[in-house]
Image (cartoon, helix red, strand yellow):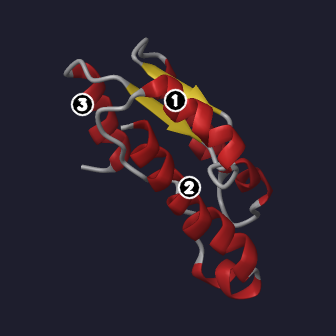
C-alpha cells in the first residue's frame, strides 16, 4: 500500500493527521505538483486532516506548530526527492532534507 493509501486508512480508523509542505517544492520542474495537489484534496476531505503551508527548514514556522500540536507521533515524509537535482543544487537539497529533518526532530523533543 502506498503512503496515500496508508494515510486514508489511518484517518478512517480515527487518527488525526497534519500535513506540511516544503514551501520551495512548487518550483521543482521534475515533480508533478498537480499530482500532489490532487492527493492533498483527497486527504483534506477528512475533518481530522489539517494541512499547513510552511517551510520545514524554517524553525520560526515549525516551533509554533509543535507548541500547539502536542503530537503523539510524527512521521517525516517531507524529504525532497530527486537525486539528479541534489547533485546540481546540493544546498537546496540539504536545506529541505537535512536541516528540515533536524528542525523537525528538535521541535518534537522540545514539545515533549
User: Which residue is found at the position 70% from the left and 82% from the top?
Assistant: 90
Name the one closer to the observer, 59 or 53.
59
- 74 or 68, nearer to the observer: 68
What residue did someone put label 3 on?
A: 9
Q: Is residue 81 above or below residue 1?
A: below
Q: Position of residue 5 (x, y in %)?
A: 30, 39
Q: CA distance from mark 1 to mark 2?
A: 13 Å
Q: Residue furthest right?
A: 27
Q: Secondary structure at mark 2?
A: helix
> Which quadrant of the figure has residue 83?
bottom right
Q: Quadrant of the C terminus?
A: top left
Disc 3 to disc 2, C-alpha distance: 28 Å
**Residue under pointer 1:** 67
Packing grade of label 2 (10 A; few <14, some 14-19, many >=20) is some
Mark earlier in primary sequence (1, 2): 1
Residue at the spot 24% in from the left edge and 30% down from the top edge: 9
The quadrant holding residue 93 is bottom right
Please name the residue that numbered disc 2 is placed on: 103
Location of residue 96 in the rendering, given as x and y in whole percent from the top left corner = 63, 63
In the picture, measured across the screen, residue 93 lies left or right of residue 39, that is: right
Q: Could you tell me if residue 48 is visible in this image? A: yes
Amino acid at each position: 500500500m502506498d503512503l496515500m493509501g496508508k494515510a486514508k486508512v489511518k484517518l478512517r480508523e480515527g487518527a488525526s493527521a497534519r500535513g506540511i509542505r516544503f514551501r520551495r517544492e512548487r518550483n521543482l520542474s521534475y515533480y508533478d505538483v498537480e499530482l500532489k495537489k490532487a492527493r492533498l484534496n483527497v486527504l483534506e476531505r477528512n475533518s481530522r486532516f489539517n494541512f499547513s503551508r510552511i517551510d520545514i527548514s524554517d524553525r520560526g514556522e515549525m516551533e509554533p506548530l509543535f507548541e500547539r500540536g502536542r503530537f503523539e507521533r510524527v512521521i517525516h515524509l517531507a524529504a525532497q526527492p530527486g537525486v539528479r537535482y541534489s547533485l546540481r543544487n546540493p544546498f537546496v537539497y540539504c536545506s529541505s532534507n537535512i536541516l528540515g529533518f533536524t528542525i523537525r526532530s528538535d521541535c518534537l523533543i522540545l514539545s515533549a
